[in-house]
Structure formats: C-alpha cells, structure tokens
Image (tube, helix red, strand yellow):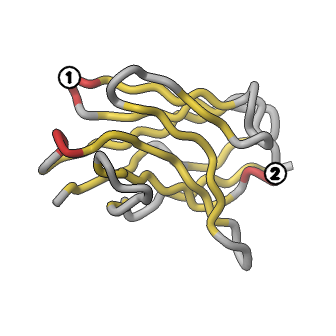
Amino acid sequence: QVQLVESGGGLVQAGGSLSLSCAASGRTASVSTMGWFRQAPGKERDFVARIRWSDGSTYYANSVKGRFTIARDNAKNTVYLQMNSLKPEDTAVYYCAAAPAGVPRYDYWGQGTQVTVSS
C-alpha cells in the first residue's frame, strides 16, 4: 500500500500562485508514476499533470501547460505542483495519485486539497 497526503491548497486571487505538495509513504518503491488530478463542483475528475519517478519526464493537460509545473524530490518521496497565473476555472479539489510499476492506472489516491481562485 501507498499512502498519499496532499497539502498547500487555499484561496488565491486570479493571476496568483500556489504550490501543492504530495508526500508518499509506505511501499513507495513500487510507484512508477505520480500524478495530479482535479475535480471541480459538478464535474468529473480531470487529469492535470504527471511525472515519472525514474527519469522525471512530465506530461501536462493542455489547460495548464505553461502555467503549472510538476516536480519530484525522490529523497523525500514528495511530488509538487507549482501553479502560476491561476484562473477562476482552476478552482477545484486537487488530488495526488500514484501508479504502480507495470499497472496502467492510478491505484492510490490522496484525500484532496481545495484550491479556490477568486476573480
């Protein structure tokens, strides 16, 4: 099992920045990919960004490309999401997720952290 704990959400004005963290514990050696997702009220959960533990390669949703940056600290088993130039439509609960090696899905999820962007 892998446990994930997010932190860093909050309220920010449009154009501002926030940084989220996701600390992983447990069987972290089994994890190959970490991702961030978000869910706005009344909408489905959407992919935001992901990073591979092995080589740090990243991939972003078009809606956040150029504004958000995902990074990792392998020594701390922590993934970060730096969010700049925030827009009201970025308002959502943000979830961290982990995918085990060889598994094409995210099996482990954090509890989520609220990000609210005011206009």
Name which quarter of the figure residue 40 lies in: bottom right
The residue beneath circle 2 is 88
Image quadrant where one finds the N terminus:
bottom left
Looking at the image, residue 75 lies above or below residue 10: above
**83 relative to 79 in the view: left or right:** right
Q: Is residue 94 above or below residue 42?
A: above
Upstream in sequence: badge 1 or badge 2: 1
Number of callouts: 2
10 Å crowding of disc 1: few (<14), some (14-19), many (20+): few
Q: Residue at x 41, y 58 (%)?
A: 106
Task: Tell me residue 22's x, y (percent).
Answer: 37, 43
Q: Nearer the viewer, residue 71 or 86?
A: 71
Q: Amino acid at mark 1?
A: Ala
**Residue 24 falls in which quadrant of the image?**
top left
Q: Nearer the viewer, residue 78 or 30?
A: 30
The type of residue carrying mark 2 is Pro
Q: Position of residue 44 (x, y in %)?
A: 68, 72
Q: Which mark is residue 84?
A: none
- Where is residue 87? Give x, y as percent: 81, 43
* Residue for point 39% across, 41% down: 33
Crowdedness near tag 2: few (<14), some (14–19) or many (≥20) residues, C-alpha within 10 Å: some
The furthest residue to the bottom? 42
- Alpha carbon distance from label 1 to label 2: 34 Å
Disc 1: which residue: 75
Q: Secondary structure at mark 1?
A: helix
81 vs 61, left or right, is: left
> In front: mark 1 or mark 2?
1
